[in-house]
Amino acid sequence: MSHEHDHEYMHEHNIPHDHEHTHADGTTHTHPHDHDHEHPHGHDHGHEHPHGCPGQAGCGSDCANCDPRAEVVALMRYMVNHNTAHANELAQLAGRLKEMGDNTAYEQVMQAVSDFEKGNMRLSTVLAALGPVQQ
Amino acid sequence: MCLSTVYKLEKRPENEVLKNVMLIECKNGFVTLTDILGREEVIEGEIASADLTGGTVVVRPKAS
């Protein structure tokens, strides 16, 4: 994933600005930001990094330079993975109910987990059909 | 959804900075936001509140 960091103003305050981050596709890397910053003006501004998108601040998917399909696919991928994590957490809760001796509740929650996983499998199939994120 | 929408000063539509934020880093008086597509916003201030069930984070200028 490419980045561009355009600065509308010349900034000058040497904050260490490097950080590791993880992209939607799971890739983790670090950008060393070795530019100087200066805030000679007294007003509050966003210090925005437009990434080629002039309407970046809160632009969501309605910006001409953004790919709304890529955003939808990325959100779908995130939610499918998130649902899997939640299904596992629910199964653990069911296990605790079983340990407490409530087998009826255990079975009901596990049935719900099964239904949840079926729905997530359907979402996963749709996601596969949508294809990889193009950015 | 456990992604967040980040606002400046207070939760108002016109104050929205970035949606679908998956990573927030605070360093040296700046808050770096990264959304689900890897887009970044860096704003000056500190996290005033984070509603993790409501998916809302508010950033305010750092108190001097």
Image (cartoon, coloured by chain):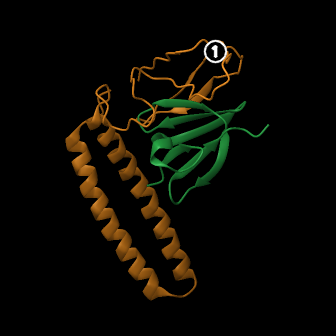
Chain colours: A orange, B green
Q: Residues within 10 Å of mark 1 (few under 14, many from 20)?
A: some
The part of the image, by quadrant, that contains residue A73 is top left
In the current view of this chain or complex, which residue is farthest to the right? B64
Question: Where residue A39 sits: x, y (%)?
Answer: 67, 18
Q: Residue at x 42, y 29 (%)?
A: A56
Front residue of B53/A91: it is: B53
**How many numbered marks does the figure carry?**
1
Quarter of the image with the C terminus of chain B in it: top right
Q: Residue at x 29, y 31 (%)?
A: A67
| A80 with respect to A100 (left or right) | left
User: Where is B18 relative to A79, above or below?
Assistant: above
User: Where is B30 relative to B15, above or below?
Assistant: above
Question: Where residue B29 sits: x, y (%)?
Answer: 71, 32
Query: Which residue position is annotated with label 1?
Result: A11
The part of the image, by quadrant, that contains residue A70 is top left
In the current view of this chain or complex, which residue is farthest to the left? A129
Quarter of the image with the N terminus of chain B in it: bottom left
Question: Where residue A123 sits: x, y (%)?
Answer: 27, 54
Front residue of A56/A69: it is: A56
Q: Chain of mark 1?
A: A
User: Where is A83 relative to B59, above or below?
Assistant: below
Front residue of A64/A78: it is: A64
Front residue of A120/A34: it is: A34
Question: Where residue A65 sits: x, y (%)?
Answer: 31, 25
Three-letter amino acid code at the position of disc 1: His
Q: Residue at x 72, y 38 (%)?
A: B62
Regarding mark 1 in the picture, which secondary structure is present there? loop
| A118 with respect to A32 (left or right) | left
